[in-house]
Amino acid sequence: MASTESSPFKKIQIQRDDTTFDAYVVGKEDAPGIVVIQEWWGVDYEIKNHAVKISQLGSGFKALIPDLYRGKVGLDVAEAQHLMDGLDWQGAVKDIAASVNWLKANGSKKAGVTGFCMGGALSIASSVLVQEVDASVAFYGVPASQLADPAQAKAPVQAHFGELDNFVGFSDVTV
């Protein structure tokens, strides 16, 4: 039986270089924009739920999730690890830049990025590599040094790490 529940998201396509990718937008039309970057699982229920909640904060935001995996979603740890290992990280940063630019071209005067784990690393990398980013908030995750040096951030960064987490890169922020 088909679901009658409608999604709060508008699915759009964004062009960058010679590729097009899907993105999902939710929130107020002319509100500040937030690019919500997926975890290693992909664009799943959890990341969409985060985007909806972010869009409802304060007086409202326009949240946009770029699909960095082009429709693929990891259903278990091994699959998620495989998807993340296969990610073109520089291409992902370009997708994020195109997403920020889309938000600014579609009513958002300012646009920031946020992400969790893999998305946190990409959020920090975006604050270094994407001139148009106005702010970045990372929840776990640090970019590889060959991708971006966090000390070179051009936008304000707020980073959250689990003090008691013993997973490398999650509590030891000096990594």
Image (spheres, rainbow, N blue to C red):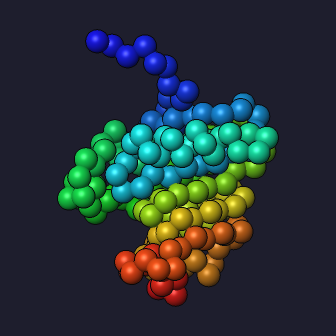
Residue 27 pos. (x, y %): 66, 34
Horizontal side of residue 113 vs 61, given as left or right: left
Residue drawn at point x = 57 percent, y = 34 percent: 25
Q: Is residue 170 above or below residue 139?
A: below
Q: Is residue 68 above or below residue 156?
A: above
Q: Is residue 37 above or below residue 103?
A: below
Q: Is residue 19 visible?
A: no
Quarter of the image containing the N terminus?
Answer: top left
Along the line of sight, the residue nearer the viewer: 53 or 78: 53
Q: Is residue 120 visible?
A: yes
Residue 66 pos. (x, y %): 49, 44
Residue 70 pos. (x, y %): 35, 42
Where residue 170 sits, quadrant-wise, is bottom left
Residue drawn at point x = 68 percent, y = 39 percent: 56
Q: Is residue 108 above or below residue 138?
A: above
Along the line of sight, the residue nearer the viewer: 76 or 108: 76
